[in-house]
Amino acid sequence: MKIAVIGCGYLGAVHAAAMASLGYETVGVDVDEAKIERLRRGEPPFYEPGLPELLRAGVDAGTLRFTTDVAEAAGSDVVFIAVGTPQRAGSDAADLTYVDAAIESLLPHLTEGTLVAGKSTVPVGTAQRLADLVTPTGARLAWNPEFLREGFAVEDTLTPDRLVYGVADADDASVARLDEVYATILARGTDRLVVNFATAELVKVSANAFLATKISFINAMAELSETVGADVTQLADAIGLDARIGRRFLNAGLGFGGGCLPKDIRAFQARAEELGHGQTLGFLREVDQINLRRRDRMVEVIDRELAAVGGDRVAMLGLAFKPNSDDVRDSPALDVSRRLQEGGRVVKAYDPEAAETARWVLPTLDIVGSIEEAIRGADVLALGTEWQHFRDLDPAEVAGMTAARVVVDGRNALDAAAWAAAGFKVIGLGRPDTV
Ligand code: UGA
């Protein structure tokens, strides 16, 4: 089996490495020369636990290659499309430029029997449009959405919760081909659902919309809790014990960011509007607004605490949109840092992995090399990303390194009682203050 993966970003690089690890001769294709150069050396262009080992194993074994020449995808049994679908500039809709360009460049190299399998997140209706372009070449098209989380990308790719195949009517050949590709994963009893194109596209965006809604639901409860003196973390524990609700993705705090949930709910809503269903998905606008209001709240609380101690220096711990990632796309922690700076505050930030990516996005931010440097001289400490490293901090030790005695926990990740015992006032979003 020969596999090609077009697009070597977060999704494609992991998918290509995973395919090679399953024993297939795999080629990853991307237009970005610098990215391909790094991947050829077995170095991922971003931080993802487990990926360097997987890449190097494939590259060293000779089963995994990378190229900028799409012609090298010719002769593949399956060509996966894994390019990005970012938010279109000046609009909420998805930008399909990269998907369209990938298909266009691929068309001259497609032959009878090749399966083009889309993995990118696309607006419903896209797969059918692309199938109409692909089928005249004798190749077939399937939509096979991906549900990996950054930080767990390798694990999620090799041991997914489910596999979804979106195929054209009676296209048993594509189903059989995908079953062959995923044979090792299916042999573990992984659920596999065969659906039509529209369902496959909707499964992906509705899953992300549901997750975003769950987060914003608990953050709406956090807003209320702040007014009435309730504790949103206890509330989440209590409602989460109902198995129908579940405790996962009920962590209140700074809310969601990253390259997927924010742009996916906006694109979903924009597509619904095009389909005459603007009202149907109108609640996603609220989901987005609740999410963004948490950042306002964090800035407000930090400003209030700075005013109380008569200072203006903030230590921001964490910049990535979530732990185990160096991704700062739409990162709440970075957004809060930027807004504090715009308000004239002096921010020193530290992140174990995202310093380089954050510097690129916000060059004016003072990003330092250690926790100590960030907190020394600070008036207020703020937690923006719940890296394990920060959770594990010994508050008594921290108290010895800084004169600050206030910590604003934007992720409700710190042990508030332990920090309070070490002399800190702990403020969690949606929780009564611990003094
Ligand atoms: C998300 C989905 O979880 C994946 O299933 C999907 O495949 C992926 O998007 C995608 O479309 O490619 P990801 O963006 O990597 O994955 O990150 P998540 O783990 O979903 O976290 C998203 C954001 O929500 C983070 O900023 C995180 O801090 C925040 N979050 C998560 C909360 O604020 N509270 C929670 O309880 C959980």
Image: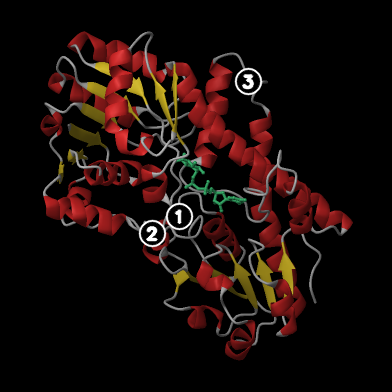
Determine contact: label 3, label 2, CB under 8 Å.
no
Dot 1: few (<14), some (14–19), or many (≥20) neighbours within 10 Å?
A: many
Crowd rating for badge 2 (residues with CA inside 10 Å; few <14, some 14–19, many 20+): some
Say whether residue 64 is left or right of residue 339: left
Q: Residue at image x 42%, y 17%?
A: 197
As drawn, the label of residue 278 is: 3
- Label 1 sits on what residue type? Val
The answer to whether marks 1 and 2 mark residues whose Cβ atoms lie closer than 8 Å is yes
Q: Secondary structure at mark 3?
A: loop
Rounded to the nearest angstrom, the CA distance separating label 3 from label 2 is: 35 Å
Judged from this view, the residue extending furthest toward the right is 228
Residue pointed to by mark 1: 328
Q: Residues within 10 Å of mark 3 (few under 14, many from 20)?
A: some
Quick check: 81 above or below 430?
above
Q: Nearer the viewer, residue 135 or 302?
A: 135
Give the mark nearest the N terminus, 3 or 2: 3
Residue 429 appears at what percent x and percent y? Answer: 72, 60
Tell me the residue at 78%/61% (across/down): 431
Q: Which residue is mark 2?
A: 357
Amino acid found under the numbered disc labelled 2: Thr
Picture residue at 20% right of the left edge, 55% below the top: 57
The amino acid pointed to by label 3 is: Gly
